[in-house]
Amino acid sequence: MPPEISVRIDGEDVRVRGDCSVAAALRQAGYAATRLAHDGSRRAACCGMGICFECRVQIDGRERLACLTPVAAGMEIWRDA
Amino acid sequence: MRELRSEVLVLGAGPAGIAAAVSAERAGARALLVDMQAEPGGQIWRGQWNKATDSTARRWLSALRASPVEGRYGLRLVDVPAPGEFVFDGADGPLRVHCERAVIAAGARERLLPFPGWTLPGVFGAGGLQVLAKNGWPVAGKRIVVAGSGPLLLAAAASLRSLGAQIVLIAEQSGWRDLAAFGSGLLGTPHKVVQAAGLWRKLIGVPYRTGSWVTQALGDNEVRSVIVRRGRQIVQLDCDALAVGYGLVPNTEIARALGCELRDGAVWVDMHQHTSVPGVYCAGEGTGIGGIDQALVQGEIAGCAAAGRAELAATAQRRRRGSERFAAHLRRHFGLRAELRSLAQDDTVLCRCENVAFGAAKACSSMRDARLQTRLGMGHCQARVCGAACEFLFGWGAATPRPPLAPAGLSCFNLSTSAENPQEPT
Ligand SMILES: Cc1cc2nc3c(=O)[nH]c(=O)nc-3n(C[C@H](O)[C@H](O)[C@H](O)COP(=O)(O)OP(=O)(O)OC[C@H]3O[C@@H](n4cnc5c(N)ncnc54)[C@H](O)[C@@H]3O)c2cc1C
Ligand code: FES
């Protein structure tokens, strides 16, 4: 197994695989959605390649695409969901 | 703003961009290779940079490592303020690049079509879930339905299965007659037959249905099951994920922002991959969907030509014709069936960003009209998803992209002088 790292998701400390994208880390940690649409419905990563923008989350204070961002130890990730 | 100068700028580090940058350096030019992904490799070689298992990937990725090409990753092109000037945005803020010539190698995206339930978490593009899984999205032990159209369904299903997923079904919307014609047409390109046979071997025991398509995804917070139609037969299948894509569409936003001419939805190029704009070249899926072989061949040609040494690509020129035949063959046999136009109901979301319903869009006359009346295509993705859907659903052409090409930190635009008419990079 690849080594695990600690990140903080919505204020909670979780351990995830260190060799993956933030999108994958969120899913490994059990979070299905990344954001809420205007109508309150839940959305999550869809295209996997930076096209749909459904996977956007706050990473260390900036809006980023979770599918294009490698996860790193100590990252602070906030979902809008 | 950080600034960089380069002779040749290569936009996109998939197979086409890697071949272009390496070839430009070999031909004596200084090349800068930029991609919004964290590593080079594009879609097909996702995750291969540090552990290449594919022999072609290993060859090109080591050629890139050994070459003096300067690579910058995690940077997305967001603006083309003036000829020869390109503004990128990334985690460390914006970067402005000045170059003499540019090669656009921005690849393709999947065509996603709306149907009830398609916005549920757990519904992905077919290649979409494949590339997410290559970057660690957990699929082991998950029941996955793969659906849509084209050879990518097989590649996606095979790689998901190799990561431990259980493929419940592959539903291909094309009928078996088209598929048989596609298969027999491949006999002229023996290595494609070998590739296809390799894929099928990895899929032994997986149910594969032609003339079948998903009409609905069901679930509360996540997809739990899908409804699949085949002729008059309708079945409901339980699953943990649905991976559904209706073929690929060339990414042409960058080329259009630079003023390059398009033909049939792809960037027009001459035999040296030169676009209609002086000093701007295009290679790979942007010139028309053709797969990895076409991407590599066109990348080599574009790299040599952008370095001013087009004659060095003579052998690549010969291979170019074979890759063109395959591309034409692909287009002929995976046409989308008309029934797919009536999957969305009036209240089904069509524009995912602005939550515009199919019914509201249907009442409009063009992409521009729908933008004005409903805000369709005005959200974060800037019509990258709904634009390709509307083209198929209503026959609407794409609206001209305006900067920014993607939402970016405001710092990117402070210093920009906006160009009404982007022209020749000098
Ligand atoms: C999701 C997906 C999965 C696929 N999987 C397979 C497969 O398993 N097997 C197969 O044979 N084919 C696959 N394909 C087909 C694929 O298009 C080709 O095989 C091949 O990757 C094309 O090479 P390319 O260099 O033209 O484009 P790509 O490989 O798509 O490379 C284009 C690159 O440009 C970058 N880019 C785009 N826009 C910008 C921008 N604004 N700023 C910065 N960078 C940018 C992208 O991040 C990408 O890395 C897949 C396609 C998709 C969309
Ligand atoms: S999943 Fe579509 S942009 Fe990240």
Image (spheres, coloured by chain):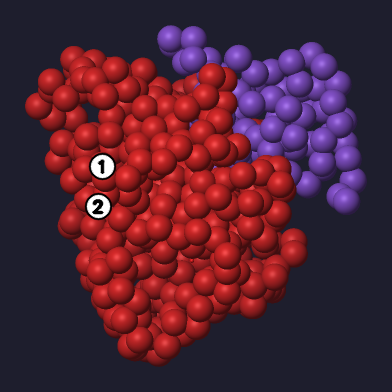
Chain colours: A purple, B red
Q: Residues within 10 Å of mark 1 (few under 14, many from 20)?
A: some
Task: Say whether mark 1 is within 8 Å of ligand 1.
Answer: no
- Tell me where residue B134 appears, x and y as whole percent: 65, 52
Q: Quadrant of the N terminus of chain B?
A: top right
Residue at image x 23%, y 57%?
A: B335
- Tell me where residue B384 appears, x and y as whole percent: 36, 37
Check disc 1 and give the amino acid type. Answer: Leu
Which of these two is toward me, B51 or B105?
B51
Which of these two is toward me, B9 or B317?
B317
Task: Say whether mark 2 is within 8 Å of ligand 1.
Answer: no
User: Compared to A6, does B311 lie above or below?
Assistant: below
Q: Quadrant of the C terminus of chain B?
A: bottom left
Residue at image x 40%, y 58%?
A: B209
| Tag 1 near tag 2, CB within 8 Å | yes
Residue under pointer 2:
B336
Check disc 2 and give the amino acid type. Answer: Leu
Say if residue B1 shows up in the picture: no
- Tell me where residue B138 appears, x and y as whole percent: 70, 43
User: Compared to B297, does B84 lie above or below?
Assistant: above
Task: Say which element carries label 2.
Answer: loop
Residue at image x 18%, y 56%?
A: B264
The numbered disc on residue B340 is 1
The reply, left or right, for residue A4 in relation to residue B1 is right
As measured in the structure, the alpha-carbon distance from the residue carrying label 1 to the one carrying label 2 is: 7 Å
- Tell me where residue B92 appears, x and y as whole percent: 66, 33
Say if residue B223 shows up in the picture: yes
- Parent chain of label 2: B
